[in-house]
Amino acid sequence: MSGGRSLAPELREPARKLIATGRIRAELDVELYRAAVQGRRELTDFFRVELGWVVEVVESAELVRLHKRRSDVPTDRGPWLRREGRPVHLVSKEILALVALVCEQLWRRPRMSLRELMQAIAQVCAAEALADQLPQFKIVASDGTGKKDARTSRTNLVDALKLLVDEGSITVDADLDRAISEDENDLVVSASRERLAQKFSSLSPALLGLADLPAARHAEALSSRVLSSAALGDETGLVEELNAGEPSVDERRLRAVRRLVDDPASDPLDDRAAMPYLHTPAGRDRALEVIASLGFTTTARRDWWEVTDASGIGTLIDFPNGRRNERQAALALLDAVTQRPDPRGELHLSEVVELFAQVRTRVPRWAAAYDHRLPALARAAAAELVAVGLLARRGPDVWQPTPGVHFWRVAVRHSAPVTGTTSNGGKDVAP
């Protein structure tokens, strides 16, 4: 690789898995874990040089952890709550705060009953109530707390525990959902200190002095370069880095390549330099080599780059697969957008609703669950395309198609109606 490091073929899948999830756990991915442990030096060097990210192999915890740090944090990124196996929405700030509080308590006592855990968190939240630093957490209905508020607190805690269980940081010995409604159900929560130590990718906000920085600088302060200065106790270096002027070529390279591997799509023109990094021959070649080394597939235009993984290992996005009404509606919308006189023109909710009304006129049984609720279907379809970088939000119920819409060809086929069944139609899609 010119100017960089290549990656051995047997390390490509572990690397993509780390990019998608941040973790490889021995109990779930035996082969990927074994390959990552055997190739740890090459893997850590690759991520350090090409992406500026730290990989830690912790054999005592049977965990390989990638600490991804970005100063340009995606605003729509984060843990998702799942209902019936499907992601529903991003978790709230209250739940994220409870995740941190759970980790704090389990670090002190790696094995606790749920009742003990709830009481400990309630005490911490009550102590910080006057400073308004932590969410209200009251688990017992009292004079000042209704049953609804107490149930909400318990539900939020259960959601926080589910997130930690899913990532392998903790285990529980009973069904968490029963803990919401059964006061007598006192399950046991156990944690691995080795895994808890690897959960967070930054230093403590208190150590970084975030309280002394404006909120707009917090993400920057938590990024990798600043952490190195803070860890060394170099407060002068911290201030200098935060107040630095134009980014260096290396900083621009890291920013561009991180976006390519971590986002569903990337706009090269987001680089405000006179010559965007991905427009330079050296920058374009190096980015393509990094992506190829990881085993991703790239489709690139001067104004848009799209990186995909046919294996599904390196991404949590399953678009365009699936036969849900919302996914089918998204494909129909994508097809309609590319056929507009101005494919890049703003898209309004009314236009999407009209499109779906026309589809239902031709196929009355399609999206029957959204009968008389086409605006809800339109928003759901648009959200699907926003998630994969094909639409960008421009305001309430207004979207802007991105150049990525030109990368897709959608063929919509309406299947013949079948007596006694509901026909959802069929769609073929090819990028």
Image: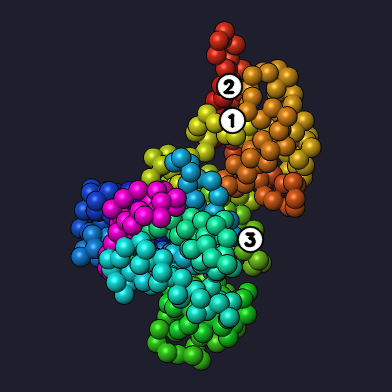
What distance separates the C-alpha of mark 3 from that of mark 2?
Answer: 39 Å
Tags 3 and 1 touching, CB below 8 Å: no
Snapshot quadrant of residue 370: top right
Q: Secondary structure at mark 3?
A: helix
Q: Quadrant of the C terminus?
A: top right
Q: Residue at x 66, y 45 (%)?
A: 391
Q: Is residue 193 visible from the viewing direction of this image? A: yes
Q: Position of residue 416 (x, y in %)?
A: 59, 11
Q: Nearer the viewer, residue 99 or 208?
A: 99
* Residue on which the image places disc 3: 270
**Range of residues picked out in magenta:** 165-194
What distance separates the C-alpha of mark 1 from that of mark 2?
Answer: 8 Å
Above or below for 278 versus 30? below
* Residue on which the image places disc 2: 424
Above or below for 426 versus 375? above
Q: Residue at x 47, y 65 (%)?
A: 98
Q: Residue at x 48, y 82 (%)?
A: 206
